[in-house]
Image (tube, rainbow, N blue to C red):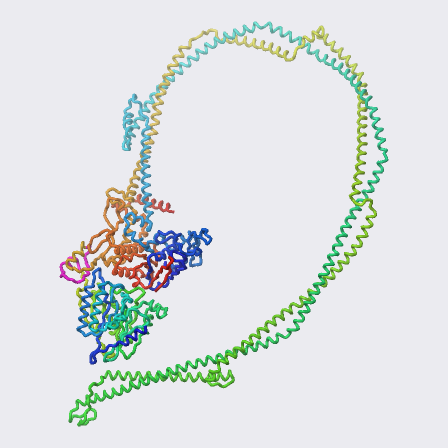
């Protein structure tokens, strides 16, 4: 593991001297190969990666940071792999340094494949944690920039490597961060895939994030105070945590309907001398937007402009519309989900205590049943007979 | 119920003792059990279910098969399960029964064992008590447990895909609706029973109705005919009509009966009159007949008169002869007596003559025998011998005693020798002890001395060691000092650097200010600083002036650096002082302890050696001390032993003296006995007692025979004597009586002859012929008297009858008789008729009452039957024109609705709002189909469709929701059943990536409220999503081991 670091050390990049500063593109949570409600999003992902590639060219980006969750599954589909292959190849052709870490959705081992070989092409992949956080040195006019790559690591592995017993996630991460060699002279960038919060504030969360059980837990942003910029992945909404230099770039596409209101973007960081950084968000426009529409069925049908967007339709009608989805598909060909929001569904959400049948005596239950079937209540003689019959049954049981 | 720890031994594929500690999963509360197919994932659930209930979770594995088939046979299969329930801890140990082969090849049975440890230290043992305890504790039975807690492989899908009937069975088991079903049956039975009652009552009514006695057709009673018509087809409706008809009929019968009665009475009177007449006529005829008979009797009697007179004469003669009889008797007796006396005398005289000489003979024999001299000799010898017998006895005794005494003497001699030896032994011992004691006299004192030495050595060692620690401490502190000093110098340089930067910047800044200011300068205008109006050399601005911020920043930097520098130097100063203090104290201590002034280096060098020597010293003295301790102990022992030995010796000496005395006494006795025996032998005649006794016996025998002979002779003589005397006596008596007897004989003869003459007998013969026996005599007399009496009665009777029948003649009674008979017949006829009518009327009245009662009873029962039938039909779903819904099914439907509501809450999430489970409504013809059919509504199409149309993954989601819903209801129903655990066995393989993520969310939600959820799956993706896991590794050889990861 020590070897790795030295190798990185040797590979320095020199860039133009002058007033220019290194421009990083912070990217992450690509989830290539994801299917949303059985809709394969690979085409949309291809479209957005092309757009990102254009942005890179237009903004003279010299380095790309990909903060984890490259693929959606640990064994990605072949389309996803091909897409990423193409993307990296294009970046490499432009002589751009790419820094990649694995996230909780990726298989770190698989992502790590051929990583040492790829170093020659300025593609640095950190898929598995082996005891020390590796870093890559870049140099520019202002000095050195150290990019530290912390992949997603399971608490059990940290415990095993560092011989710790603690269950506290924050302690484990702190232990890992101790292995960073931070030279305060340099500008230090950390790429990590974690769930970071500031103080007690809850960040914006999405359904598609999927915390692994017993895996990522939230850690406070104060752990990162010695770093100049922390490029985070895992949360899908673009946001900063605590201070501007600790940021989630967010996912490039909306991956669930809970993200329908997000504005997706990539983050551009212009890094000048230490303490001088310019952070900018470049908005992304997807091929097909993802949104929710709500209203009565007829209204939705009549108001429709034919749209190719991915739609979640929320019908407010009281009764279920027959063949609702098929009909709506005529106007919204890419409708993915149909739910109802009416009095009944609202009522169902109110948790009513389950009226226990045992609260009623058997005779009472039968009286209700009799009334239901005969449309008249029981006469007193009949009630007496019923009670006696139940008594006999109880005796018999004993 | 929350599991704490599970230990399986030789169970399923787990050969070794396998432990699962569930507390490791309490933090995350969701964990995965993963492993290859067949590695033993479900076995863990089996173990838990088996431990609690004694049966497996899937119901398809028998307890005997739990034994690990590959295990060594001596390892006992067992499951130990610790769990927590409502805050208390419990533990169950269960070992199943099984047979196995011991090493020598025999099959042995391992007995099962079940133990439950309760939290209050109580213990339940045995399969049944434990099972009951567990059921009571958890509140749910095995079936419900499987339904709620263990969602076992493929099992909970059953509920989804079951048809209505199967679902009914499942619900019945889980919600215990059997009592409603029993209720239905109760009602039905009651109704049937009541129906039967109704029918019986009706048949009773009909039967009674039939038993109405109708009139004969010839009687032509119209009411009866009508009744007959109705009775052919009896119905309850015709009751009223029947009743009225019957009453009328009864009345008619009664009237007819009355008429017949009257007629009968009339006839009766006629009969009575005729009878009277007839008896009168008959009396008359009888009297006349009797008169004629009496006449005839009297005539017969008259003819017998003569014979009777003859008999009378005969009687007289016999009487006379009787009076003479006694005299004859006495004459005969006298003659007899005389003859007898003469005969006696003769006889006795003969006896006397024969016996006398014999007697004399015998008496002489006796006398000669008595004078035999031999007798005397014998007698004297006898007395002599018997006197000597006791002396023999004494001799024997003395001889025996002599033997004994000799033996005792020998014993005592031997004993003496022994005692002497013992005494010698004790003397020797005493000597040895005394010698030893003198040797070790002084050990106590030496021990004390040694102890003191040891103590001082020990103290010295600890002091030296103390010095050592002080030294090390001092070294440490010195190092710290060096470090701090370095830091301080570093900070100082930093500060100076920052400071120079700052001053530079400051200069720059000021100059810049000056430059800026200079720019505003104009000639002839005063400089704001100095006021001069001329500005020969205005200051210049630099190219890149430092900003105020930069300046401030730099200043701040410098200041902070300064502060830190000062701080550092302070701390280092403190540390230095500390070090110096430590050194000083160390030096002082060294001087004190070692009595030498050491420098620190010297001390450092020397210290190890000093420590070593001190320690050795200590060890030495310790050893010596221990030795002396041992010696002192021994001395004490010996001192105790000595007096004991002395006492023993003295005891032995005393014993010796006793024995010697005894022996002497015995020897004296010996001499005495020998002398006595000698004197006794001299006196005795015979050598031994036996011989003397034999002699004595023979003499006695001889004397005895002699005496016997003499006695026999004497008795014989006496007998003869007495016989003779007796005969003599008789002879004398008889002779005296002879004279008197002769005289008597004569006189009686004379008297007899006189009597004969008196009574008129001619001679003795006539007398004899006149004699008659007494009985004959009395018979004759009675005959005569009878005759006389009957004669007189006949006469009187005849006279009477003649008086009564003076004018009468015979009358003919035949005619009267026939008249009476006809009357009698007619009356009987009338009576019969009357009886018929009345009996019939009476019978019919009873019947009328009966049928009234029967009808009423039937009516009551019929009403209640209607009521019951209605209830029963409602409960059993057999109401006409209504849905065939039974009560039990209705209850189940209510439950089902509740279950569906809870299930839909989850399915809504899992299917993202698309699917909803609904119960199929609507009336159906077939009874068994209503109520529990399940459909799924697809919100996308808005239409319901059967659950079989769901895909595999969707089925799994629906089944899981259903199972969770069911478990919610069961828990809320058993109110207070706390089930903080749930296990889901497989099923996730049918879900795709998205569905898995959603299902995981649902599972995670399940852990809310502190619930532990365990998932079995072999799906790889879940391994990434769920980190806490139990991995089951299959080993070659067919058994498995576990690995826990959190």
The quadrant of the image that shows the N terminus of chain A is: bottom left
Q: Which residues are magenta?
A: A295-320
B597 lies left or right of B6: right
**Residue at point 50%, 83% (across, down):** B592
**Residue at point 32%, 29% (across, down):** B210
A123 lies left or right of A304: right
Viewer-proximal residue among B668 and B1011 = B668
**Relative image position of residue A356 (x, y in whole percent):** 31, 53
Up/down of B149 relative to B703, above or below: below
Up/down of B851 relative to A134, above or below: above
Residue A117: name its quadrant: bottom left
**Relative image position of residue B137 (x, y in whole percent):** 39, 55
Report if residue A201 is visible in the image. no
Up/down of A245 relative to B520, above or below: above
Viewer-proximal residue among B4 and A75 = A75
**Relative image position of residue B624 (x, y in whole percent):** 57, 75
Viewer-proximal residue among B750 and B62 = B62
Up/down of A131 relative to B197, above or below: below
**Relative image position of residue B952 (x, y in whole percent):** 26, 55
B620 lies left or right of A331: right
Is residue B279 rendered magenta in the image?
no
């Amino acid at each position: 593991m020590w070897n790795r670091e030295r190798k990185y050390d040797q590979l320095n990049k020199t860039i133009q001297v002058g007033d220019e500063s290194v421009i990083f593109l912070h990217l992450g949570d690509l989830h290539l190969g994801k299917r949303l409600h059985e809709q394969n999003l690979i085409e949309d992902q291809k479209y957005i990666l092309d757009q990102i590639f254009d942005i890179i060219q237009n903004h003279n980006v010299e380095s790309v940071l990909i903060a984890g969750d490259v693929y959606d599954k640990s064994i990605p589909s072949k389309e996803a792999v091909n897409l990423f292959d193409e993307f990296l190849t294009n970046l490499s052709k432009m002589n751009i340094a790419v820094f990649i870490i694995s996230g909780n959705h990726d298989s770190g081992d698989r992502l790590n494949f051929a990583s040492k070989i790829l170093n020659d092409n300025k593609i640095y992949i950190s898929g598995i944690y082996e005891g020390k956080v590796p870093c890559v040195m870049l140099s520019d006019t202002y000095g050195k920039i150290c990019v530290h790559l912390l992949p997603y690591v399971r608490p059990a592995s940290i415990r095993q490597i560092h011989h710790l017993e603690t269950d506290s996630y924050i302690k484990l991460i702190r232990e890992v961060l101790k292995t960073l060699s931070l030279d305060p002279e340099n500008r230090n960038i950390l790429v990590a895939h974690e769930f970071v919060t500031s103080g007690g504030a809850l960040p914006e969360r999405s359904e598609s994030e999927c915390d692994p059980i017993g895996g990522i837990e939230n850690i406070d942003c104060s752990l990162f105070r010695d770093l100049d910029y922390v490029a985070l992945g895992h949360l899908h909404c673009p946001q900063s945590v605590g201070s501007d230099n600790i940021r989630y770039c967010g996912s490039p596409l909306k991956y669930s309907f809970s993200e329908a209101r997000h504005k997706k973007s990539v983050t551009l960081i212009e890094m000048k001398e230490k303490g001088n950084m310019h952070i900018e968000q470049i908005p992304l426009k997807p091929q097909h937007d993802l949104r929710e529409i709500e209203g009565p069925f007829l209204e939705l049908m009549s108001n429709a402009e034919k749209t190719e967007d991915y739609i979640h339709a929320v019908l407010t009608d009281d009764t279920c519309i027959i063949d609702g989805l098929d009909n709506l598909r005529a106007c919204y060909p890419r409708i993915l989900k149909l739910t109802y929001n009416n009095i009944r569904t609202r009522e169902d959400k109110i948790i009513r205590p389950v009226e226990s049948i045992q609260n009623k005596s058997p005779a009472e239950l039968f009286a209700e049943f009799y009334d239901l079937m005969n449309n008249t209540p029981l006469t007193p003689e009949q009630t007496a007979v019923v009670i006696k019959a139940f008594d006999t049954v109880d005796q018999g049981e004993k | 119920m929350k599991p704490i720890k599970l230990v399986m031994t030789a169970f399923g594929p787990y050969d070794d003792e396998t432990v699962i500690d569930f507390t490791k999963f309490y933090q995350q509360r969701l964990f995965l059990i993963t492993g290859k197919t067949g590695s033993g994932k479900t076995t863990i659930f089996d173990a838990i279910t088996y431990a609690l209930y004694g049966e497996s979770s899937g119901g398809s594995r028998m307890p005997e098969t739990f034994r690990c088939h590959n295990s060594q046979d001596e390892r006992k299969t067992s499951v130990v399960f610790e769990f927590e329930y409502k805050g208390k801890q419990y533990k169950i140990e269960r070992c199943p029964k099984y047979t196995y082969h011991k090493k020598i090849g025999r099959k042995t049975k391992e007995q099962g064992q079940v133990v439950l440890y309760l939290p209050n230290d109580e213990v339940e043992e045995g399969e049944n008590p434990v099972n009951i305890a567990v059921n009571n504790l958890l509140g749910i039975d095995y079936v419900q447990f499987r339904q709620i807690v263990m969602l076992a492989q493929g099992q909970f899908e059953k509920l989804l895909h079951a048809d209505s009937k199967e679902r009914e069975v499942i619900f019945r088991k889980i919600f215990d609706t059997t009592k409603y079903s029993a209720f239905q049956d109760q009602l039905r039975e009651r109704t049937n029973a009541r129906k039967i009652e109704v029918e019986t009552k009706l048949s009773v009514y009909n039967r009674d109705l039939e038993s109405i006695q109708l009139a004969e057709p010839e009687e032509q009673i119209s009411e009866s005919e009508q009744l007959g018509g109705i009775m052919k087809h009896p119905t309850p409706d015709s009751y009223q009509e029947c009743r009225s008809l019957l009453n009328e009929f009864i009345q008619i019968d009664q009237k007819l009966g009355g008429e017949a009665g009257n007629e009968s009475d009339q006839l009766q009177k006629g009969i009575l009159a005729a009878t009277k007449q007839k008896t009168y006529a008959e009396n008359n005829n009888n009297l006349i007949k009797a008169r004629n008979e009496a006449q005839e009797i009297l005539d017969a009697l008259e003819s017998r008169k003569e014979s009777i007179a003859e008999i009378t004469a005969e009687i007289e003669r016999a009487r006379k002869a009787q009076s003479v009889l006694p005299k004859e008797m006495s004459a005969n007796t006298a003659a007899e007596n005389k003859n007898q006396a003469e005969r006696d005398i003769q006889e006795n005289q003969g006896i006397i003559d024969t016996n006398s000489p014999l007697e004399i003979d015998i008496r002489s024999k006796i006398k000669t025998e008595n004078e035999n001299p031999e007798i005397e000799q014998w007698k004297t010898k006898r007395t002599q011998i018997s006197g000597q017998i006791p002396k023999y006895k004494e001799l024997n005794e003395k001889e025996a005693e002599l033997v004994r005494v000799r033996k005792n003497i020998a014993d005592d001699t031997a004993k003496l020798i022994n005692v002497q030896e013992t005494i010698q032994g004790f003397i020797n011992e005493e000597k040895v002890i005394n010698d030893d004691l003198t040797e070790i006299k002084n050990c106590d004192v030496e021990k004390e001395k040694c102890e003191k030495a040891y103590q001082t050595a020990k103290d010295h060692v600890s002091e030296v060691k103390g010095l050592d620690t002080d030294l090390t401490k001092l070294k440490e502190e010195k190092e710290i000092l060096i470090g701090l000093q370095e830091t301080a110098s570093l900070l100082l340089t930093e500060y100076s650097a920052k400071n120079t930067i700052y001053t530079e910047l400051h200069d720059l800044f000021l100059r810049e200010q000056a430059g800026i200011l200079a720019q505003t300068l104009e000639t002839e205008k005063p400089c704001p600083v100095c006021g001069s109006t001329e500005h020969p050399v205005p200051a210049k601005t630099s190219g890149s002036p430092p900003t105020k911020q930069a300046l401030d920043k730099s200043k701040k930097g410098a200041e902070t650096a300064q502060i830190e520098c000062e701080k550092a130097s302070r701390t280092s100063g403190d540390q230095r002082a500390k070090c110096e203090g430590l050194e000083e104290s160390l030096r002082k201590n060294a001087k004190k302890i070692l009595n030498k002034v050491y420098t620190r280096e010297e001390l450092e060098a020397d210290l190890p050696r000093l420590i070593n020597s001190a320690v050795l010293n200590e060890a030495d003295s310790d050893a010596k001390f221990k030795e002396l301790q041992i010696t002192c102990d021994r001395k004490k022992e010996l001192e105790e032993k000595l007096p004991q030995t002395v006492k023993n010796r003295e005891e032995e000496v005393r014993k010796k003296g006793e024995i010697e005395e005894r022996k002497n006494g015995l020897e004296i006795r010996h001499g005495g006995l020998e002398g006595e025996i000698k004197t006794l032998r001299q006196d005795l005649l015979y050598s031994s007692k036996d011989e003397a006794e034999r002699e004595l016996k023979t003499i006695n025998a001889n004397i005895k025979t002699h005496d016997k002979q003499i006695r026999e002779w004497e008795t014989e003589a006496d007998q003869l004597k007495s016989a003779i005397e007796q005969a003599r006596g008789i002879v004398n008596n008889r002779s005296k009586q002879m004279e008197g007897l002769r005289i008597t004989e004569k006189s009686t003869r004379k008297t007899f002859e006189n009597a004969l003459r008196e009574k008129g007998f001619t001679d003795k013969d006539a007398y004899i012929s006149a004699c008659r026996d007494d009985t004959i005599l009395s018979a004759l007399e009675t005959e005569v008297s009878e005759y006389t009496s009957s004669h007189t009665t006949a006469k009187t009777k005849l006279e009477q009858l003649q008086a009564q029948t003076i004018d009468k003649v015979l009358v003919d009674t035949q005619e009267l008789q026939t008249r009476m008979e006809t009357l009698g017949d007619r009356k009987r006829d009338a009576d019969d008729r009357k009886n018929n009518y009345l009996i019939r009327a009476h019978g019919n009245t009873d019947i009328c009452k009966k049928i009234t009662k029967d009808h009423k009873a039937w009516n009551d029962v019929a009403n209640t039957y209607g009521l019951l039938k209605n209830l029963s039909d409602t409960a059993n779903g057999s109401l006409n024109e209504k849905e065939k819904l039974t009560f039990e099914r209705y209850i189940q439907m209510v439950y089902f609705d509740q279950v569906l509501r809870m299930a839909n809450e989850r399915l809504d999430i899992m299917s993202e709002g698309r699917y909803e489970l609904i119960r199929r409504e609507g009336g159906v013809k077939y009874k068994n189909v209503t109520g529990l059919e399940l459909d799924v509504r697809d919100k996308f199409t808005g239409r319901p469709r059967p659950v079989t149309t769901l895909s595999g993954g969707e089925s799994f989601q629906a089944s899981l929701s259903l199972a969770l819903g069911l478990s919610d209801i069961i828990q809320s129903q058993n109110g207070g059943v706390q089930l903080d655990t749930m296990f889901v066995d497989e099923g996730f393989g049918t879900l795709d990536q998205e569905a898995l993520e959603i299902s995981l969310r649902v599972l995670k939600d399940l852990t809310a409220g502190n619930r532990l959820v365990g998932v079995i799956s072999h799906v790889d993706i879940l391994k990434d999503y769920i980190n806490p896991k139990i991995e089951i590794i299959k080993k070659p050889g067919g058994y498995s081991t576990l690995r826990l990861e959190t």
